[in-house]
Amino acid sequence: MAKKQSWTQNKNAGHLIALVFYIAVGYFFYVAASNMNYVWKWNSVPKYFAYEEITNVEAPIDGKLVLEDGKYFLDGDEKVALPKLDSSFSFEYKVGDNIYQYDYIASKKETKAGPILNGLWVTLKISFFSAILTFFIGIIVAFMKLSSLSFLRSIATVYITVVRGTPLLVQIFLFYFIVANIFELERFVAGVLSLGIFFGAYMAEILRGAIQSIDKGQLEAARSLGISNFQAMRYIILPQAFKRALPTLVGEMIALVKDSSLVSVISITDLTKVGKEIVANTFSPFETWIVVALLYLCITSVLSFIGHRIEKNMQAKGGMS
């Protein structure tokens, strides 16, 4: 009991020391920024998440405001129909009032997503579709690598060697300027394919290693029971392989989300490109990149949490069985 209490105290002390360390690091950067005479503009950040858009309806001609059959008109030298005005509009005039041309008849305020939220949505979409493509390519190439057919192994080996041996940024440029132009692919599709092909090579090697780590005796035992190779791989080998590879797979997905920022070089308006545009317009690099970094951190933290939960559930099921 005393040992457990001592261990808990040491753990709490360790957490406190770590907290003090990060506070000191933060204070150091704050002092460094202060010495640069940098003017912080945190009050300008919220409008890039969401903003209010005001829509004004102008009078196209001089005339009297008329309401007929639920529609508004201006009755002057001629009767002109006005855009659809509903209850969300705030009217400056009443029906029957005389209105002069270019006067504001009504206005409406709408809250719209700002560029940061739009960029975040693009990042989530491109990461999601790239992750699906990564798993699809990874599983196929892993089985090609394990195939008894030499030409399939050769194809997989060359693909993995080339993709893992060249930078992702270079691959994005090559894919966009060559392949995407030949097949007339959109930027978004080119970005998804580039990320999926790149991380598919790493996924293939992870899955291959995980499958090969399973004792071959299990496959032989399955055959002796009359289970086909496909069924044995699906119900016996792959579940164990995925369980062993899960931490590494989660790490690859986190890396994919972070590296998705590179697609900004082909003018995909993701979170990183939005950050560049905001910095260019506001000259507030510190606030902008801190916010962008925190958003990426939120995404990767959620992925890490989900991965840990899945791993715990799989361990619990394995323990029960």
Image: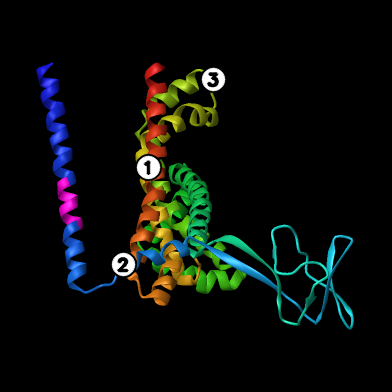
Residue at mark 3: 226
> Which is nearer the eye, 87 or 180?
87
At which x and y percent is residue 181?
57, 73
Residue type, mark 2 in image: Phe
At which x and y percent is residue 300?
38, 48
Residue at mark 2: 286
> Which is nearer the eye, 64 or 159?
64
The magenta segment: 20-26
**Residue at disc 3, secondary structure:** loop
Question: Relative to 303, does residue 277 appear above or below in the rendering?
Answer: below
Q: Left or right: 91 with respect to 26?
A: right
Tag 1 or tag 3, which sits nearer the N-term?
3
Residues at marks 1 and 2, CA–CA distance in whole angstroms: 26 Å
Residue 157 visible in this rendered orientation of the protein: no
Q: Left or right: 30 with respect to 271?
A: left
Residue at point 57%, 61% (across, down) = 112
Residue 102 visible in this rendered orientation of the protein: yes
The quadrant of the rendering that contains the C terminus is top left
